[in-house]
Image (cartoon, rainbow, N blue to C red):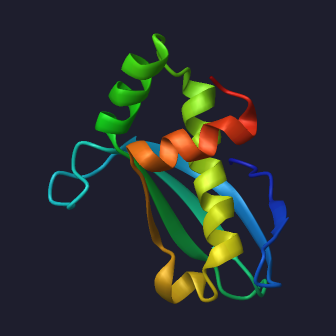
Amino acid sequence: MTIRRMKTYTGGQGYVYQYYFVGQRPAVPADPEAGAMEFIFDVTSDRKTTFAVSVFLRPQAVTAWAQAHRRSLTDAEQYAAVKMRLFQAFDEIEDMMAQGRRLIVDSAALEALLPALHVD
């Protein structure tokens, strides 16, 4: 039995989200984001309804970042960027269940998210 560590984040819209990391996998071939790495989180804002949020990290973004910064991102840094994208959605999207279940980390997002983590 896997015990998941539930975490809490208070979003900019006033909702208090509880979430945990489920896992990651390559996006399925039929998905429009095929080729990306899909990070899956289970999220709730009311402790009654839990829904999955997928954050897709595009490989082109990781490659472009590595070329621009002359080093590869570690797995932990990639996860941190994905988690920051999740937090950004918590802050900006009012109805996560209806509008925030598929999030993208592209090159522009990666460049914007990582400085907050002092990754350069």
The image quarter containing residue 81 is top right
Outermost residue, top direction? 70
Q: Where in the figure is residue 110, as x and y percent of width and height?
A: 50, 42
Q: Where in the figure is residue 41, as x and y percent of width and height?
A: 58, 59
Q: Is residue 84 above or below residue 63?
A: below
Q: Left of 14 or right of it: where is 92? A: left
Q: Is residue 62 above or below residue 108?
A: above
* Residue depicted at 74% across the width and 29% down the height: 118
* Residue depicted at 78% across the width and 83% down the height: 47
Q: Where in the figure is residue 28, as x and y percent of width and height?
A: 24, 52
| Residue 38 in sight | no
Q: Where in the figure is residue 113, as x and y percent of width and height?
A: 61, 45
Taking depth in this image into account, of 35 and 104 the one nearest to the observer is 104
Q: Left of 103 or right of it: where is 27? A: left
Taking depth in this image into account, of 109 and 16 the one nearest to the observer is 109
The image quarter containing residue 61 is top left
Q: Left of 103 or right of it: where is 17? A: right
Name the quarter where the C terminus is drawn. top right
